[in-house]
Every structure is written in structure tokens, then in C-alpha cells.
Amino acid sequence: MKQPVAILGASGYTGGELARILANHPHVEVVYASSERFAGKPWNAIYPHLGRAGSLILSAMDADAAADAAQIVFCALPHKTSMSVVPRLLERGCTVIDLSADFRLKSAATYEEWYETPHIAPQLLAEAVYGLPELYREQIRGQKLIACPGCYPTSVIVPLYPLVKAGAIEAEGIIADCKSGVSGAGRSPSQGVMLSELNEGFKAYKVGKHRHTAEMEQALSEAAGRELTVRFTPHLLPQSRGILSTCYVKPIGEGDAEAARELLRQAYADEPFVDILPAGVNPATSDVRGANGVRISVDMDHRTGWMLVISVIDNLVKGSSGQATQNLNLAMGWEETTGLETVALFP
Ligand SMILES: NC(=O)C1=CN([C@@H]2O[C@H](COP(=O)(O)OP(=O)(O)OC[C@H]3O[C@@H](n4cnc5c(N)ncnc54)[C@H](OP(=O)(O)O)[C@@H]3O)[C@@H](O)[C@H]2O)C=CC1
Ligand SMILES: CC(=O)N[C@@H](CCC(=O)OP(=O)(O)O)C(=O)O
């Protein structure tokens, strides 16, 4: 029998992508989906590509109604909104897979500093697990509250964590130069995401103050065993989806790109969603469009002594809804790739 699932924030981009992925999942069925603006309309009126899988009528969000309908709840909601419902969902015994930023940072003070809002459920931060399966798989199994990572942090932490942990690169001085497709900004209309503003243009934004910096620093500091800082600059690409992150790092020792590749190959040897590219090949966002993968290249700029670690993900799949599905599978004790086989798996 399929397990009933609820999606809060079902009309957004990540909610829509979850619908697409879960439609192919053999163990779950979405029985409750929320939207404020489109309540009363069928899901496929917003996302016609869902076809029959989107015949559910959207409801205005009600945590108790969601918990009555399903014991597994995805929160594809903006930060702040998520933490307003998660405590009630947990009280009702639900397994909560939260795609927002509300439970990713371990320190309420750090959250409040970067998100400029009080954390209203700080007591849950210690029990929430950071939902990056390649690093925290064992902690995610059977968990009740999983905080899915941000899209940029996924693209930076996956390639750099093993290199920092092994002492192959200097912990200080990491530069994360990242570019995202505009679906990363969500589906709510605003001037900044209009085609006429974005098309054939390219810009940096939130320079020196993007909130994902804290998330990258939290994970990479753990890898280093001491506090480090990351210089992160996000840019907006004139395309719908995909993130490409170019990380500039200082190797320790002579700077051997093949040794760094081998270290990553070993760290991710059994990972179906991580692909370490051979010398001379660099990844493109189109490589992972619709796929749950991370593709990574490593090059050495011998002239300057810097190593370049480049990664790509689809922000709506490995960057959010695909990773959320990996987390669902781990939380429920199912094969981790379930429902994700129809998107590319790397050998
Ligand atoms: N887009 C991306 O690439 C990524 C997004 N995330 C995170 O995932 C979450 C969802 O992102 P995304 O799908 O892009 O966002 P969208 O803006 O596309 O969708 C947000 C959803 O939340 C609903 N919503 C908004 N405000 C409220 C409210 N006050 N009460 C109830 N429902 C509300 C919206 O409903 P309505 O129909 O009423 O608008 C909509 O369904 C965010 O926290 C985001 O930061 C994480 C990684 C990547
Ligand atoms: C292109 C774009 O605007 N991207 C978003 C990141 C989306 C995301 O993952 O944000 P959360 O941490 O809130 O989940 C941004 O820079 O704010």
C-alpha cells in the first residue's frame, strides 16, 4: 500500500518538481497539497505537465488537515512560514522534510543574524538533521525532521567537504563563485525575475551577504575541525534552472589535480548521484537538467597555484526536490534511489 504524503507549498517550483518526481515513486501518493493563491484549483491547472498526477485540488495550508491526511509532510514553503507549521506537524507525529532554511543552521543566533528574524522554534534545531545524504546518511535514517540543504550550499559542500576533511586544501581562503538559474528565486512574481530584466544579462547579487554563506561555513568548518570563512558570491543566470559553482581553493602540497580527483572518487565511490569527471572535462548545467546528480571537475592552475573545483547541479532536483526525495527514502528505510531512477543515475 502506498504511504500518503502531503506537500505544503505545492504551487511553487520545488512543490511542482516534487509532484513530478513523486508521481514515479512506487511507495507514496500525494494526497494533500497546499497553495494560498490557487486554493480550490486543481494542481495541474498550474502545472499542466503533471497531467493525471496533478488532479488533486489544492487547499489553503492547514497543518492539522495535512497531518490528518498524511504522516509524511514536505514543507516546500518560504523560510519563516515553514517554522510556523513544523512544530505542530511534529506534535502530530509526522515525518517532516523541510526544504526551507529554517532548520539548517545549528545555532539560532546564526540564523537570526543571517535571516534577520527571530527563530520561533529554536528547541528543534538540535534534533533537525542536515539532509545532505552523501555526508549525513546514517543520521538521516529514521529521522523525523530533515532540513534539506540550500541549492548553492549543496553545489559547494559536496565537492569541497572531502578535500577539506582530508587536509588536501587550505581551510581558509575558499572562494565560491556560483551562478544560478532564475527558478532558484521561486515562482512569486517580482521585477527582478522578469524576462525583460534578465534575458541576455548577467549579474552578481547579495554580494558579501548571501545567507547561504553561513550554511557553507557550518558544514566546511565541521570538515576542517575549526571555524573557517567562505567568500561566496551568487550570480543570476539568464536561464531557468541549473547551478554552476566555480570554487577557487589553495591546495596543500604541490597541487595535484589528479590526486584531488582520486580523493573525491574514493569519497564518493558508492554514490549513485555524484560524478567525478576525468581530466580535461568540465561540467555544464545542461548535463544535469532534470537529474539528481552533482558533476564535479578538478583542474590545477599551475601558474597561480590555485585549484579550481567546478560543480553543477539542477537547483530544482539535487538542489531541492530530488534531494528531498533521497531524504524521504532514507527516513522511511526505502532504497535511496527510489523514485529517482527515471532521472539520470551515474555509474
Ligand atoms: N527554488 C529553488 O531552487 C530552491 C528553493 N529552496 C527552498 O524551498 C522553499 C520553496 O521554494 P520555491 O518552491 O522555489 O518557492 P516558491 O516561491 O516557488 O513557492 C512557495 C510556496 O509556498 C507557498 N506560500 C508562500 N507563502 C505562504 C504562506 N504565508 N502560507 C502558506 N503558503 C505559503 C506558496 O503558495 P502560493 O500558491 O500561495 O504562492 C508556494 O506554494 C523555499 O524555502 C526555498 O528557499 C531550496 C532549494 C532550492
Ligand atoms: C537565484 C536565487 O534567487 N536563488 C535563491 C536561493 C534559493 C534557495 O535555495 O534558498 P533558501 O536558502 O531560502 O532555500 C537566493 O539567492 O535567495
Image: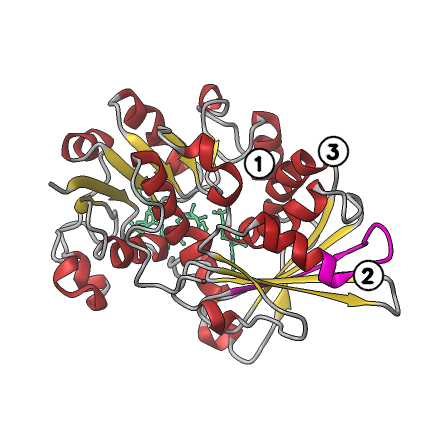
The residue wearing badge 1 is: 116
Q: Quadrant of the N terminus?
A: top left
Magenta span contains residue 254: yes
Assess whether mark 2 and mark 1 are in contact (beta carbons under 8 angstroms): no
> In the image, is residue 104 above or below residue 125?
below
Which residues make up the magenta segment? 243-259
Q: Amino acid at mark 3?
A: Glu
Q: Is residue 91 above or below residue 157?
A: above
Residue identifier under label 2 = 306
Question: Which amino acid, mark 2?
Answer: Trp
Q: Earlier in the sequence, mark 1 or mark 2?
A: 1
- x 51%, y 78%: residue: 199
Disc 3 residue crowd, few under 14, some 14–19, many 20+, Cα 10 Å: some
User: Residue under circle 3?
Assistant: 227
Q: CA distance from mark 3 to mark 2?
A: 22 Å
Crowd band around label 2 with a 10 angstrom C-alpha radius: few (<14), some (14–19), many (20+): some
Q: Earlier in the sequence, mark 3 or mark 2?
A: 3
Residue 168 among magenta residues = no
